[in-house]
Image (tube, rainbow, N blue to C red):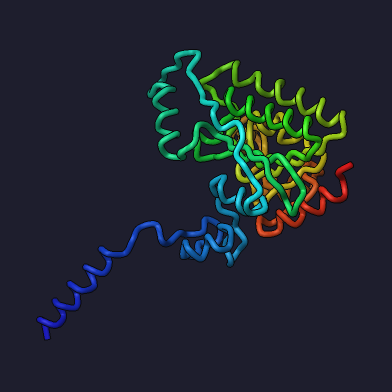
Amino acid sequence: MSWFRRKDKNITDNSKKNIPSGLWLKCPTCSEIQYKPELDKNYSVCRHCEHHFRVQPSVYRDLLLDEGTFTEIFNNIKPSDPLDFEAEKKYVEQLETAQLKTKQNDAINCFNGQINTHEVILAIMNFSFIGGSMGSVVGELVSRSIESAREKKIPLILICSSGGARMQESSLSLLQLAKTSSKLARFQEEGGLFIPILTDPTTGGVTASFGMLGDVILAEPGALIGFAGPRVIKQTIGQDLPEGFQRAEFLKDKGFVDRIVPRQKMKDILSKLIEMLIK
């Protein structure tokens, strides 16, 4: 009997070793264990509690844009290190690590494509690239996306996901707030339609600029949205914060967000908004 037990144990151990890693994920909201291939089929939305996992730009691209209609634009622009910034790690090393990890030049991808046959410019921020921080390249690509939409007279959709301005570029990063905001003002004065989609998280300089300047502001369920983080605010004011503070639902109740849209319904809602609002 002991021989069979040892044999069974060895079989079990070998089976465990052969199971690929990353196939199972734990939902941070409901703690349910998710089978990743099934989660991917549902656009990385938990089937139990509707928690929206953070996803790569390619997921939004494939979800929103009609198949075979899109081309990536402005993908030849790369960041530099004008301040020769160095802390625990050199900025150039951080950039190299992020570029290898994400296979992209910076924290944003831009596309010209169609949403249910409506031509749009779609820009998608990537939190995996140094926290989606906004440096000179992000500001430049957002500005070029605005100008492209203005010249073509088509809507601009911008999916926001950012921890704020990129401190490694100091004031050069902060200048992007004014740069993008002024471009947007001109675009909207000429009748352009701008729809930002706030995902988890949208904070700092992005919230303080183009993230909150949309004609219609959409958000994903449960997204963290704000300027400073809740811990910093609590320490500053010395008071407990309301339940759900800085979440999409809280901001909608306070009038900062127009509508909360689940990821699976985003394309349909965008299409209807374009049909209603485009001139």
Q: Quadrant of residue 138?
A: top right
Q: Position of residue 209 (x, y in %)?
A: 71, 29
Q: Is residue 14 above or below residue 112?
A: below
Residue furthest out toward the top: 83
Q: Position of residue 58 (x, y in %)?
A: 56, 47
Q: Position of residue 220 (x, y in %)?
A: 67, 51
The C terminus is located in which quarter?
top right
Q: Is residue 6 above or below residue 79?
A: below
Residue furthest out toward the left: 3
**Residue 243 visible from this viewpoint:** no
Task: Tell which of 97 and 48 is nearer to you.
Answer: 97
**Residue 63 visible from this viewpoint:** yes
Residue furthest out toward the front: 68
Residue at x 70% of width, y 44% of height: 197
Q: Position of residue 195 (x, y in %)?
A: 76, 41
- In this rendering, the count of numbered labels is 0
Task: Tell which of 147 and 238 is nearer to you.
Answer: 147
Residue furthest out toward the right: 279
The N terminus is located in which quarter?
bottom left
Q: Is residue 129 above or below residue 174?
A: below
Task: Tell which of 279 and 231 is nearer to you.
Answer: 279
Residue at x 59% of width, y 37% of height: 109
Left or right of 212? Residue 201 is: left
Residue at x 76% of width, y 25% of height: 183
Left or right of 230? Residue 14 is: left
Residue at x 78% of width, y 30% of height: 151
